[in-house]
């Protein structure tokens, strides 16, 4: 197995601590996304795995092998750079063949391998074109082919789609996932774009601005069951209510000053989830129902005035003021095919959600 | 129509602003060049130029003149090659390793230009003469018992030629290496290349434009150089530059001087062009299908 283990790794630049005692395990053969805001140290972590940097302390393993001190060129790790870094003095073929040539493979074998990988990324026709004759998406594919032709244990991708437009990015994401399925190589994908990460990842890790790992899990776990307000806020959008936990015999409530009391599911075995503890309730906007008429069958209810409406096409966002300093965001799918909005500005509306839709977080 | 005219005036430099430069160029470059070529086809008697003869040129189809041309050519090629071999590591160090000291070192590199060339050449006498600095240091350390002959030979010529022309090689190479993106080198290492493979396959090919510029910045003036080889070589041999100045200033035969100027100028152009083709051949170009 080629599991990557990062143990107690610290790294500082000019006295600035980027990573501090970081531990992370990246499972073998998975599409692993590393998601965090810019400046969170995710690129630094990638560069440590590639070998462009050495950690100040701690060790990095691939499988059972300690690679902390192994030179860049002896690691079975290849990188797809953000700006591609394709060699401008070589054509597509020579770029892809580079890794095989420096290893001294026979030219015949090189040609076979390069042709094969270029057909995988749909670039047979561009084989002898020079780099500046290629479009952004084609350059991206060359960079990908140049890396995977070496059959690495781990492929590192540093925001590889950042330079592409939206449509192309979506198509490349699908191709990347298909390629990973085919190769079964461990992909480590660094991005600050939560949609990309949620789309491609088998497992993802969320890093905060201090270079700490906040949570590791499947995209669904991360989105539906965030473990901190940072994760809840950074991945997707959410409504956060600060309040006090009230644990009674048969039910648990959260008391949010000036807004109301809501029924919640109490997290078990958490020292911070006690009767009278200060906690935060997170409710995703799409899990809230909005209605002008009172509805039955919901555990939690709020009343407010529609302050603004943002129409997205497939959904509409309502910003509803429920208290002086509290605005709740609600997403509603535009299921009905109508010309005018049923709910308008200044309308008085009811908001409803079920107990299970909220997540209680440590403040 | 009016608008496009105004736009073109705004975007391009108006013609009248080019006129002074053009006049200067014609008066002080093309006209003198024309006179030199014209005079080279004349013969001189009592300070008068009689017209139209090939005779001056016929003189140069003789071995002694060819030897002078070859001597200058080999001095120029030799100086350029030594400057390249010595200058590339210096440029590499300045551009990619020096960091904090970069500006100080660059300043030191161009500092000699602030002094007159003759002063610099005389300073080398003090260093290289029999009781000069170098001989004294060597005998002080005990490496030699009798002073070495370091002056009036090709060693002295090459030392001072390389000393003087080195910055012309270093600066263009430095400029290219300075702009070379780290990502290319990282990508190369990442793909399994050792630092040495990375140098030969990425760094060197991507700095060929700087090498070509530097080579010709050294080669062309070195071909006409006669002060340094004259002084350091003890005036034993004629070079292209010294032969021309001999015709003009000593023999006072301007027709011969002009003719030899034209011959050496044409040979320099041909030689430089052939060397340039050689460089282009070794510069990796994008291979289109």
Image (cartoon, rainbow, N blue to C red):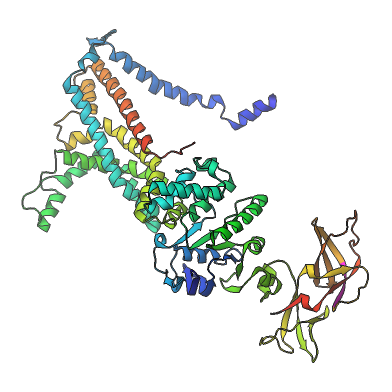
Residue at the image position 78 percent from the left and 83 percent from the top: A254
Question: For the magenta stretch, what is the residue range?
Answer: A300-305
Rendered location of residue B36, percent (x, y)? 32, 18
Majority secondary structure of magenta residues? strand
Indicate whether residue B220 is drawn in magenta. Answer: no
Relative image position of residue A46 (x, y in whole percent): 51, 64
Residue at the far left: name it: B145
Q: Quadrant of residue B123?
A: top left
Residue A168 seen in the current view: yes
| Whether residue A27 is situated above or below residue A173 in the rendered picture | below
**B19 on left or right of B256:** right
Q: Residue furthest right?
A: A293
- The vertical placement of B25 against B187, above or below, is above
Please provide percent x and percent y for residue A289: 84, 69
Q: Is residue B243 left or right of residue A142?
A: left
**Residue B235 falls in image quadrant:** top left
* Residue B67 point in image, percent of width and height: 18, 26
- From this viewpoint, is residue B179 visible? no
Identify the residue at horizontal 58%, vertical 44% (top origin): A135
A305 sits to left or right of B63: right
Q: Quadrant of the C terminus of chain A?
A: bottom right
Residue A301 magenta: yes
Front residue (pair A36, B150): A36
Q: Nearer the viewer, residue B176 or A212?
A: A212
Residue under the image location 51 percent in, 40 percent down? A129
Residue B275, compared with residue A225, is above or below; it is above
């Amino acid at each position: 197995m080629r599991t990557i283990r990062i143990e107690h790794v610290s790294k500082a630049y000019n006295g600035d601590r980027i990573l501090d005692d970081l531990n992370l395990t990246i499972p073998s053969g998975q599409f692993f996304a590393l998601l965090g805001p810019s400046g969170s140290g995710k690129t630094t972590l990638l560069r440590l795995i590639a070998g462009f940097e050495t950690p100040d302390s701690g060790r990095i393993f691939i499988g059972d092998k300690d690679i902390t001190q192994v030179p860049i060129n002896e690691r079975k790790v290849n990188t797809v750079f953000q700006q591609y870094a394709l060699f401008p003095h070589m054509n597509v073929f020579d770029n892809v063949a580079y890794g095989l040539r420096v290893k001294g493979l026979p030219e015949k074998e090189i040609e076979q391998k390069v042709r094969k990988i270029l057909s995988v990324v749909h670039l047979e026709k561009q084989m002898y074109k020079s780099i500046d004759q290629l479009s952004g998406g084609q350059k991206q594919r060359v960079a990908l082919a140049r890396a995977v032709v070496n059959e690495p244990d781990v492929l590192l991708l540093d925001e590889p789609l950042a330079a592409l437009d939206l449509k192309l990015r979506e198509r490349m994401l699908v191709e990347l996932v298909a390629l990973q399925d085919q190769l079964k190589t461990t992909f480590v994908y660094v991005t600050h774009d939560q949609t990309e990460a949620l789309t491609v990842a088998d497992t993802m890790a969320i890093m905060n601005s201090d270079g700490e790992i906040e949570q590791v899990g499947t995209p669904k776990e991360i989105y539906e069951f965030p473990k901190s307000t940072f994760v809840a806020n950074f991945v997707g959008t959410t409504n956060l209510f600060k309040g006090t936990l009230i644990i009674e015999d048969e039910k648990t409530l959260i008391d949010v000053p000036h807004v109301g009391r809501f029924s919640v599911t109490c997290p078990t075995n958490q020292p911070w989830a006690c009767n009278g503890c200060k906690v935060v309730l997170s409710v995703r906007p799409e899990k809230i129902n909005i209605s002008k008429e009172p509805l039955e069958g919901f555990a939690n209810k709020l009343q407010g005035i529609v302050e603004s409406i943002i129409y997205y096409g497939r959904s509409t966002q309502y910003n509803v003021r429920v208290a002086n300093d509290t605005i709740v965001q609600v997403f509603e799918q535009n299921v009905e095919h109508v010309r005018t909005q049923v709910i308008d500005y200044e309308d008085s509306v009811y908001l409803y959600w079920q107990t299970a839709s909220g997540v209680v977080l440590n403040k | 129509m009016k608008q496009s005219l105004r736009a073109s005036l705004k975007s391009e430099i108006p013609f009248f602003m080019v006129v002074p430069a053009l006049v200067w160029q014609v008066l002080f470059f093309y006209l003198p060049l024309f006179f030199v070529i014209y005079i080279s086809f004349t013969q001189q008697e009592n300070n008068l130029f009689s017209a139209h003869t090939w005779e001056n040129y016929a003189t140069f189809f003789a071995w002694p003149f060819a030897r002078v041309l070859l001597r200058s050519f080999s001095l120029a090629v030799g100086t350029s090659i030594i400057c390249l071999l010595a200058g590339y590591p210096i440029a590499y160090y300045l551009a990619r390793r020096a960091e904090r000291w970069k500006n100080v070192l660059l300043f030191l590199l161009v500092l000699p230009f602030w002094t007159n060339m003759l002063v610099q050449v005389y300073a080398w006498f003090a260093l290289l003469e029999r009781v000069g600095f170098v001989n004294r240091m060597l005998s002080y350390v005990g490496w030699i018992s009798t002073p070495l002959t370091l002056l009036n030979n090709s060693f002295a010529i090459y030392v001072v030629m390389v000393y003087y022309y080195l910055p012309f090689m270093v600066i263009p190479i430095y400029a290219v290496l300075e702009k070379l993106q780290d990502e290319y080198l990282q990508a190369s290492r990442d793909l399994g290349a050792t630092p040495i493979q990375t140098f030969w396959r990425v760094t060197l090919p991507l700095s060929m434009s700087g090498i070509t510029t530097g080579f010709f910045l050294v080669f062309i003036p070195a071909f006409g150089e006669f002060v340094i080889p004259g002084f350091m070589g003890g005036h034993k041999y004629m070079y292209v530059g010294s032969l021309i100045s001999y015709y003009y200033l000593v023999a006072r035969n301007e027709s011969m001087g002009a003719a030899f100027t034209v011959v050496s100028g044409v040979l320099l152009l041909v030689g430089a062009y052939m060397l340039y083709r050689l460089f282009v051949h070794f510069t990796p170009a994008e291979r289109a299908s």
